[in-house]
Image (cartoon, grey):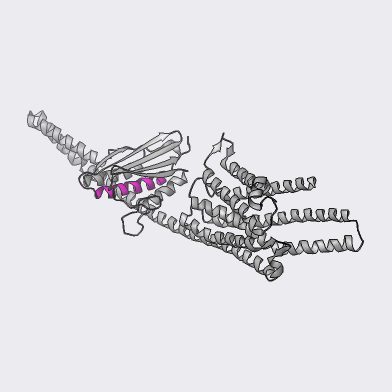
Amino acid sequence: MEMKNVIYACLDIAESAALGGLLVYLMKGMLPERFVWKGKIHASFFFWLQFVAAREFLSYSNLVKRLIYGEGMQIASSRQSIAPVLASLCITLLAGFLLYRGSRIKAVSLVAAFYAFLELIRFFMYPFAVWCIGRWVDWYTERNFVAENGDLALYYAGIERVELFWNVSHACLAFAGVLTCVFLYKRALASGGTAYRPEEAAVLCVPELMGLSFTVMLRSILFYYEKEVYNLVDHYPELNGMIPCVAFLCIASILLNVKMLGKVEREHEKRRRAELCQSRAEELYAHVKDLESVNLKIRGMKHDLKHYTADIQALLLKIESGDMWAKEELRHYVDSMHLSLERLDSKCQTNHPVTDVIIGRYERLMEQKQISFSCDFIYPKQFGIDVFDLSVILNNGLENALEACEREPGKAKASILSKQKGNMFFITIENTCSKRMRWGEEFPISEKRENGHGLGLKNIKDCAERYFGRVCVQILDNRFILTVMLQGQSVP
């Protein structure tokens, strides 16, 4: 008996370890881990460890058995098996909140999906498993005991071997079923990207919780002991077909639901990419117009240069002839030429012609609208950050700053600065803003009404994520502060 208990305990630990690994696989890539302990042990290891420990504790602790099953510590009703399942689910969910970052509703949807698959696969197999073990025991009894008047001790030993083989086979088949469901779920979810919104995660929870509710209902009525065992499927044989059918439909609804979400996310991503391309085309067009404007002014300056030199020569001749007023006129003339040349150049030198033109354009626009503007931005050549991605960030950030400042006439200010720290590059755009701003899920809601409104900050976020960075938005004392963090790679 002791050897049998040891074997079953080892089987339970192996099953819990395998299922825990499957749960970690489901969570991986969907939610970021909170920490890596000593640079080696990830938070996911502790998540796996708690799952195994919780299952084993709930299965073998005498205290838990006494609380659930009474002093006899023997299950008398299938209803009593609900508590360990729900306790394990709650402990795993709490561990998920502590060990993973991100939306909690996403953690709920992932954990609920895993437990729904685990329970539904069991009940999908239950009627067939009960029928098979019953037929197997009848066949073994007929062959090895009744027909041959076999030894009772040998008969029970054979029954135990059959029971062990069947339990191992059943555990392997159940694990294979859960593995298949989790793989299909993860693949469908990953195909739409990991950035699905909390409301979409809430939609995923509906069929998962429906499946769990179905299994809880079955556990509450499936069987109980009084003077004899009352088994629901014995009294209602049609349930042998209905239970697997409903369990299969619940699994199918979970998988189809997540597949539809993946399809919606892919379409949403295509639309976002199209909008980003349109935005980039508009930025490129504005960039070309700026270059044309500067080039036109330079050509005009070159065209007038011969007139300037002729005028200077005439003034020099007057000075040589002793006209002292000509000297003052020459100084004034040269100062005017210098001022004209300064207007062609931006006050902000960023170390790259593209960023020079972009910031220079917004500098001139703000000067026209009497908005105070300051710049301390340097293009990070050694960071391997593409200048076109930077142009998306600068154009969208400065455009939003200009629009916000236009709503605060007379006292508006805007600024842009950059800072390097290690392999990180920070861009901060700050501007005057109104306190009355409506917020969406993570960014303020744009007040623009034309096509493509509200895409600026999303485009900035897309560029930041391309460099493993992020976007932070703050509003402090009527100041809107946009901080973009980019992770660069050193280039020679």
In the figure, residue 155 lies in which quadrant? Answer: bottom right
- Asked if one can make out residue 291 in the rendered structure from this viewpoint, the answer is no
Quick one: 35 or 54, which is closer to the camera? 54
Residue 299 lies in magenta, yes or no?
Answer: no
Residue drawn 20% across the image and 45% down it? 410
Relative placement, left or right, of 237 versus 377 is: right
- Asked if one can make out residue 176 in the rendered structure from this viewpoint, the answer is yes
Residue drawn 56% across the image and 55% down it? 112
Relative placement, left or right, of 314 versus 68 is: left
Relative placement, left or right, of 91 versus 293 is: right
Q: Position of residue 213 (x, y in %)?
A: 57, 61
Quick one: 233 or 404, which is closer to the camera? 233
Give, as a single range, the part of the protein colored magenta.
387-410
Q: Main secondary structure of the magenta part?
A: helix
Quick one: 272 or 47, which is closer to the camera? 47
Q: Position of residue 472 (x, y in %)?
A: 39, 44
Residue drawn 64% across the image and 60% down it? 219
